[in-house]
Amino acid sequence: MEVQYTTTGIFLSQRKYILDLLRRASMEGSKATSTPMITTCQLSATEGQLVENVSLYRSIVGALQYVVITRPDIAFAVNKVCQFIHNPLDVHFKAVKRILRYLHGTLDHGLHFTKNSKLLLEGFSDASWGSDINDRRSTSSYCVFLGGSPISWSSRKQQVVSRSTAEAEYRSLAHVIAEMIWVQSLLTELGVSLRGKALVWCDSSAAVAVAGNPVLHSKFKHVELDLFFVREKIAQGLFQVGHVPSQEQVADILTKPLAVNFFNKFRSQLRVSTSGVLVMAEGGTS
């Protein structure tokens, strides 16, 4: 991992590691792509031929998980190909190669951490309901910002089938709040004081409404533990949950493959760019 100190903060990248990974996959001369996954990508667990070199697939996918440490823009795609690591097919390897082609075209990209005196803890949660064609489980995602810089992100398939969009979104909401509680605990141990309540943003109006409603609706009984967990933290004054429009939901990049315009927008908001471009929290540059 390369660390570059700038006048505004720190820039983390993995150019050398990615180049080594491209050489390992014999893709040094591959044609770059603008996104790590096509918008219509639907990876089947059964349709396709078993890859010839299973060990190579597993090795590359494992290495990609390390790249995600400084490249949250590939987190969704990498999580997707990880789901087939026990029985990888040729279509899955094709998806892996597209991720590598995207990284080839963005070798100089990395993660910016900038100085900020306003230590506000802020989280974004999202879910893609029933998006997995193999078992119809939903994908949960979140990203957590401290002082405007991303410090934690996740993209993963939910462990059970959600029966509605709101249910899937609420499970994701519980995940990000659990992560933010851990961050708060760590900061307390370090003697760092936060500014105001932690903010959580969700693009599901139904999930936001349920979070602030003390009445348990029958439709949410199967997520009762998550429901009471979130409500308890809100009642304690630790969190405030608000609604964000879908077109401003940065966690969307961690939930599903996006068209290039939205992908680039949310990638910038995740502060992933080249070292010469400082990305601001609202998506601008300076």
Image (tube, rainbow, N blue to C red):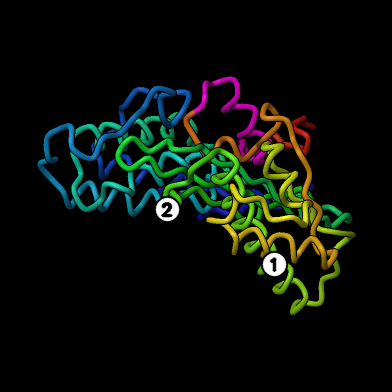
Q: Residue at x 26, y 45 (%)?
A: 24
Q: Which residue is drawn at 77% across and 30% down?
A: 284
How far from the left and from the top, in percent, is residue 139? 47, 43
Whole-number angstrom distance, CA of label 2 to CA of label 1: 23 Å
Residue neighbourhood size for the residue with mark 2, other residues' Cα within 10 Å, grouped as few (<14), some (14–19), many (≥20): few
28 vs 208: above or below: above
Q: What stretch is highlighted in magenta?
A: 258-275
Q: Which residue is drawn at 61% across and 35% down?
A: 274
Left/right placement of residue 79 relative to residue 279 reads left
How far from the left and from the top, in percent, is residue 68? 48, 49
Q: Which residue lies furthest to the bottom in this view?
A: 189
**Residue labelled with disc 2:** 160
Q: Which of the two discs, 2 and 1, sits closer to the camera?
A: 2
Nearest to N terminus: mark 2 or mark 1: 2
**Residue labelled with disc 1:** 181
Instruction: Name the quadrant containing residue 103.
Output: top left
